[in-house]
């Protein structure tokens, strides 16, 4: 596998409570296809949002990766929880050659407790479901507690990656603090390049800057 080869096939992974039609997904799919990169943007609400788990997403991604032709140079691009998923896949599937991550959701297992609170977690476990605003559906939707149970069995931080990785993270991110990406870069100093941006978690104000960096990283022989 030639890790230096320019990318000609990419799978974009959207974030939590989002979908293939998100602002960043549409922007990067358009930019990549104009650059000649075959781009796939799957719906990660599998089997549906209510029953979604990270393991189910990983299984879907495995199927997509296995369907990529052997002659293709494959990269993954992921936002937030999609960035976490991409990083997990890079360590599991040797077919992946490059990663581009936007505010990757490292440490998600620990952070749910902080984001939802102790009482919120207890109520979620007791009722078996909790509503979240789903940006793709533009309404609140329930998510089963099995999402949290699945996370507890997975590694969601302290990743060592085997391939070149480009990370963009906003210094004002209140959802996934930039320190998570800083630690990731420190642990993988030979393969990870971290770009800190004057932006928040969504990074929608930085898409042109991120595309400039991603284009060089993906399409230029390293």
Image (spheres, rainbow, N blue to C red):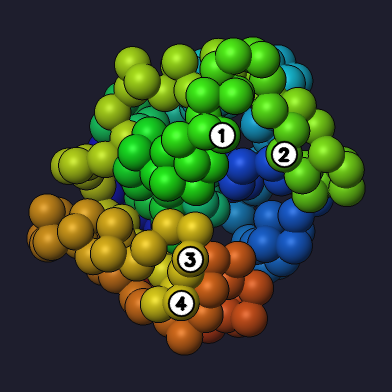
Distance of mark 2 from mark 1, alpha carbons? 12 Å
Q: Which residue is tagged 2?
A: 132
Q: Secondary structure at mark 4?
A: loop
> Closer to the camera: disc 4 or disc 1?
1
At a point 43% along the width and 81% down the height, the residue shown is 197
Quick one: label 4 or label 1, which is nearer the N terminus?
Answer: 1
Question: Up-down: is 148 above or below 204?
Answer: above
Q: Which residue is tagged 3?
A: 174
| Circle 4/circle 2 CB separation < 8 Å | no
Q: Which residue is tagged 4?
A: 172
Q: Is residue 37 visible?
A: yes
At a point 54% along the width and 66% down the height, the residue shown is 201
Q: Secondary structure at mark 2?
A: strand
Question: Up-down: is 97 above or below 44?
Answer: below
> Closer to the camera: disc 2 or disc 1?
1
Residue 38's tag is none
Question: Up-down: is 34 above or below 84?
Answer: below
Q: Which residue is tagged 1?
A: 120
């Amino acid at each position: 596998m030639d890790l230096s080869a320019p990318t000609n096939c990419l799978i974009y992974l959207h974030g939590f409570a989002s979908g293939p039609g998100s602002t960043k997904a549409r922007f990067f799919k358009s930019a990549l296809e104009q650059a000649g990169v075959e781009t796939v943007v799957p719906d990660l609400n599998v089997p549906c949002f209510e029953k979604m788990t990270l393991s189910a997403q990983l299984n879907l991604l495995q199927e997509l990766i296995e369907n990529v032709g052997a002659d293709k140079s494959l990269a993954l691009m992921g936002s937030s929880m999609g960035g976490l998923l991409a990083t997990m896949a890079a360590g599991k599937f040797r077919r992946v050659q490059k990663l581009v991550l936007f505010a990757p959701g490292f440490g998600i297992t620990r952070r749910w407790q902080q984001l939802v609170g102790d009482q919120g977690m207890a109520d979620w476990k007791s009722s078996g479901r909790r509503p979240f605003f789903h940006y793709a559906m533009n309404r609140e939707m329930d998510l089963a507690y099995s999402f949290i149970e699945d996370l507890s069995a997975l590694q969601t931080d302290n990743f060592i990656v085997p391939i070149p990785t480009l990370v963009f993270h906003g210094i004002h991110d209140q959802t996934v603090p930039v320190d998570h990406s800083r630690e990731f870069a420190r642990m993988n100093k030979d393969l990870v390049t971290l770009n800190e941006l004057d932006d928040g978690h969504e990074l929608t104000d930085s898409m042109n800057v991120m595309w400039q960096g991603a284009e060089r990283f993906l399409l230029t022989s390293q």
